[in-house]
């Protein structure tokens, strides 16, 4: 619990450490001691705990058929070669009393038989084995559905939890955004425009010429949010399984073995439902590879269960569509898919059976493009994007700051005359506008040339020319035909 409160920035590690010392001396719950020591208010603690899913009291409370849970447990035992009650609980993520009832049901049906406990009287160490009847029963169950992960939650529970952990629950400040941007150098107006957008949770459009940090700005938003949210391993809807938790998308807060042990202690004390994974708010990024099919449920015909689409995995967080307008599908078709969710804050998904169901669309969608927005979107859709932030080229002063930071990174000095030469050549000879990516490119190129020449890093006009030629090829100017060189005539 302390780890989760720290991750949510509600208390400090020092406050938790002190409360744990008090708990060791006096017993009781950690949360009560944190309130008593003034680390957190009772209201803030209750709000935090209110969003933590509580474990089901019995099989009926899961709102899933007992035979379905039994089938799931038996498949896990078979696939994972599991033998003890402790292992059963760990994989199905249900509390002991429910797993005990399922095991009892299996033994009554002669699907399992007890082997006893060799070294401990702890019921968690009781061993079981599949009977021949049980093996045949499991193989039949696997033919119908190959899902063998943690027990799912119902779609109603999922929707309720999504609504409890909306992204708008957090208040984003100027300081938070600046801290999230780290060493990135941007005009203050970017921060001032981003703040209201992040607090609203509404869709945002980042646009402007390439190379000025639109993607960097968007990605920095990933660390703006502090809240802990809970993501289910899987959801059951209309008898179908949809897998939601994705390790490539969701960052669990309980990762180390020590933290996991502490968290399991918290689970037992606070009756937390382990079918939900405590995570940071997700930040899902997709680009030119995005297709319309990726926004629909993906049904695996061999396994007979579904994988949630990307934007469902992003619920409670942000969904960034980078390089918008460069997808395989046309912008109009892609945008039409978003009209209902952005307007009504709900989305509709369809099962392969034809049955549709609704989920809350509680996430922030960020479109990022270097194309002209009015060429991509009609006025009606642009109105649905309340926040449109231009990330343009830097001013000369900002450009100089970026350049100096890159020079400092490489241990190279930037003389005034070299800086002015670079700016002049870029604008007047190359016909380019200043862009935030150029300083790093130029400095890296100059340093690479110096290294090749076995010289200390420094600027020379010809080294600068090499770098600028790699930035943009030299423009050909009309010239008179010249006589072939002696080398050419030799061929």
Image (spheres, grey):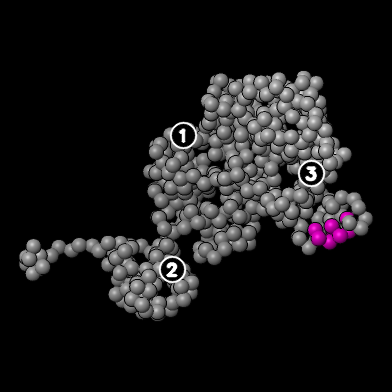
Precedes in sequence: disc 3 or disc 1: 3
Residue 262 visible, this orientation? yes
Residue 229 within the segment the image draws in magenta: no
Residue 487 in the image: x percent, y percent? 10, 68
Q: Which mark is residue 163?
A: none
**How many angstroms separate mark 3 from mark 1 (CA)?**
40 Å
Q: State how far apart marks 3 and 2 are (Cα).
A: 52 Å
Residue drawn 76% across the image and 60% down it:
13
Whether label 3 touches label 2, CB < 8 Å: no
Quarter occupied by residue 85: top right
Position of residue 209 in the picture relative to residue 258 (left or right): left
Mark earlier in primary sequence (3, 2): 3
Taking 427 as reference, is 231 above or below it? above
- The residue wearing badge 3 is 267
Magenta range:
16-23
Residue designated by label 1: 292
């Amino acid at each position: 619990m302390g780890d989760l409160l720290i991750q949510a920035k509600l208390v400090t590690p020092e406050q938790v450490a002190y409360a744990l010392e008090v708990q060791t001396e006096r017993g009781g719950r950690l949360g009560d001691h944190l309130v008593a020591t003034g680390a957190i208010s009772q209201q803030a603690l209750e709000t935090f705990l209110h969003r933590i899913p509580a474990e089901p009291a019995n099989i009926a409370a899961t709102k899933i058929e007992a035979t379905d849970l039994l089938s799931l447990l038996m498949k896990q035992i078979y696939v994972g070669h599991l033998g003890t009650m402790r292992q059963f609980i760990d994989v199905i993520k249900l509390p002991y009393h429910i797993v005990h009832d399922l095991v009892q049901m299996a033994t009554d049906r002669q699907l399992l038989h007890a082997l006893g406990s060799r070294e401990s009287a702890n019921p968690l160490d009781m061993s079981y084995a599949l009977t021949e009847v049980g093996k045949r029963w499991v193989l039949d169950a696997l033919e119908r559905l190959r899902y063998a992960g943690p027990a799912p939650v119902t779609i109603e529970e999922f929707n309720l939890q999504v609504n409890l952990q909306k992204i708008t629950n957090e208040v984003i400040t100027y300081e938070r955004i600046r801290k999230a941007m780290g060493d990135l150098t941007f005009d203050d107006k970017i921060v001032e425009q981003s703040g209201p957008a992040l607090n609203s949770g509404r869709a945002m459009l980042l646009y402007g010429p390439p190379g000025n940090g639109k993607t960097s700005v968007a990605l920095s938003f990933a660390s703006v949010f502090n809240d802990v949210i809970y993501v289910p391993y899987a959801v059951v809807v209309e008898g179908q399984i949809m897998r939601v938790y994705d390790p490539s998308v969701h960052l669990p807060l309980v990762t180390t073995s020590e933290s996991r042990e502490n968290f399991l202690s918290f689970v037992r004390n606070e009756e937390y439902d382990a079918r939900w994974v405590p995570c940071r708010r997700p930040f899902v990024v997709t680009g030119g590879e995005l297709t319309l099919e990726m926004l629909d449920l993906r049904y695996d015909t061999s396994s007979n269960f579904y994988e949630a689409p990307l934007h469902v995995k992003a619920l409670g967080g942000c969904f960034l569509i980078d390089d918008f307008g460069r997808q395989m599908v046309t912008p109009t078709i892609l945008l039409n898919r978003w009209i209902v969710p952005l307007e009504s804050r709900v989305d509709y998904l369809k099962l392969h059976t034809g049955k549709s169901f609704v989920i809350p669309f509680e996430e922030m969608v960020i479109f990022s493009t270097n194309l002209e927005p009015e060429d991509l979107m009609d006025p009606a859709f642009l109105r649905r994007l309340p926040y449109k932030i231009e990330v343009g080229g830097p001013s000369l002063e900002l450009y100089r700051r970026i350049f100096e930071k890159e020079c400092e990174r490489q241990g190279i000095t930037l003389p005034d005359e070299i800086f002015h030469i670079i700016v002049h050549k870029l604008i007047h000879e190359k016909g380019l506008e200043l862009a935030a990516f150029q300083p790093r490119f130029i400095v890296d190129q100059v340093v690479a040339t110096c290294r090749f020449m076995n010289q200390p890093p420094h600027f020379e006009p010809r080294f600068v020319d090499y770098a600028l030629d790699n930035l943009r090829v030299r423009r050909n100017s009309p010239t008179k035909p010249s006589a072939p060189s002696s080398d050419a005539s030799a061929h």
